[in-house]
Image (tube, helix red, strand yellow):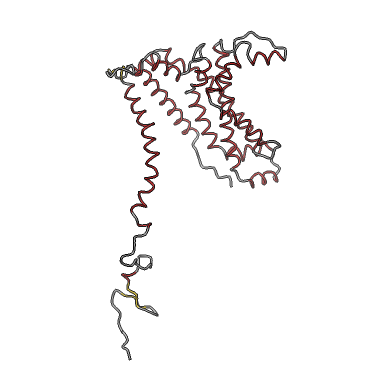
Amino acid sequence: MTETIDTAPEDAVVTGRSITDKTDRGSRGRPAPAAGRPRSWRNSPLRRITPWLFLAGPLALLITFTYVPVASMIAYSFTDWDGVSPDRETVGLDNYIRIFTRPELFRVFFVSGYYLAASVVQIAVALYFAVILSFNLKFRNLFKGILFFPYLVNGVAIGFVFLYFFQDGGTLDSVLSWFGVTTDHPWLGDPVSANISLAGVSVWRFTGLNFVLFLGAIQSIPGELYEAAELDGAGRWQRFRHIIAPGIKPVISLSVILAISGSLSVFEIPYIMTGGATGTQTFVIQTIKLAFQFNKTGLASAAAVVLLLIILLITWIQRRLVPDDKVDLV
C-alpha cells in the first residue's frame, strides 16, 4: 500500500485530483512557460518598437520636407538675405514692419476676396449636386465623373486652356456671338473682370473636390433615417435640414477651412493666366517675385510666415466658433 499525504505544502493548492503549485501558474491561472521555450511575440521587445519602425519613414519625410523648411524660413525672415550670398545680415523685425507698413505689400490680400466669394459659390454648388446625386438618379455615375473630372486635370494645363478661352476673340467671345452678343471687353485686361474670371476658373476646377467630400459624407448616413423620414412625410428640404446637414457638419467645417486657406494662397491659375498683371497679383505671387525676381529672400520669408500665421489664426477662430462636435443621428 502507498501512503497518502495528509498535509499539503503552504504554497500549494489541494484540488479534487491533484496538488498544483501556485508558483507554476500565472496571474490569470495560466501555466508558466516551460524552461527553454522561446519567448512569445506578445512579450517580445520587437513588438513594442515595430509601430515606430513603420512610422520612421513618414516621420523622417515630414520632418525633412516640412518642419525643417519652416524653421529655415522663420530664420530667414529675420535676415536681409538675397538667397545667393553666403552672408546673412540679421535685421530683427524690420521685414515684418515693412510688410505691415507698406500698403503695396499688404494690399494684395484684397484680391483674395474674389476667391473667397468664389469659394462660397463653390461649396454651395458642390453641396447641391452632392445631395441630388446621393440618391437614385438616372446617369448619376456619369454626372459624378463630369463633376470630379476638372479636379484631376493639371492646374497648369487648366491655366493655358482658359487663357485661350478668355482672350480677345477667343472661345468665350465666339460662344457669345452665337447668341447675338457681341462685346469688345477684354476679359483679362480689367482688374475686376480679370479677377472674376480667374475666380470662376477656380470654382470650375475645385468644385469636384468638395463634391466628393460631401457625397462620401452623405452616403455614410444610415439609410434607415431616410426611410423613417419618408414614412413620417418629411419632404426633401426637411430631410436635408434635419438629417443631411447635421450628418455632414464636420465635412462642411473642413470645406470652409480649405476654402479660406485656399483663397489666401492662390497661385498657379493667376500666375499662368496673367502673371499677376492687371491687378490679379495674389499674396503668394508677390512672395515668389520678392524671392526670385527681386532677390529679397528675407522679406519673402517674412511674408510667407505672415501668411502661415493668418491661416492658422483663421483656422483656430473657425474651430472655436464652430466646434467639431460628434454627431449622433441614431
Residue 260, image x, y percentages:
50, 26
Residue 237, image x, y percentages:
66, 36
Dividing the image into 4 quarters, which one contains the N terminus?
bottom left
Instruction: Tell me which residue sits at (38%, 67%) in the image.
Output: 30
Instruction: Tell me which residue sits at (33%, 16%) in the image.
Output: 82
Residue extending furthest toward the bottom: 1
Instruction: Tell me which residue sits at (33%, 70%) in the image.
Output: 24
Instruction: Tell me which residue sits at (71%, 42%) in the image.
Output: 233
Q: Is residue 164 above or below residue 38?
A: above
220 with respect to 291 (left or right): right
Between 136 and 259, the one lying in front of the other is 136
Residue extending furthest toward the top: 184
Residue 255, image x, y percentages:
53, 32
User: Number of labelled discs?
Assistant: 0
Between 220 and 296, the one lying in front of the other is 296
Residue 205, image x, y percentages:
57, 26
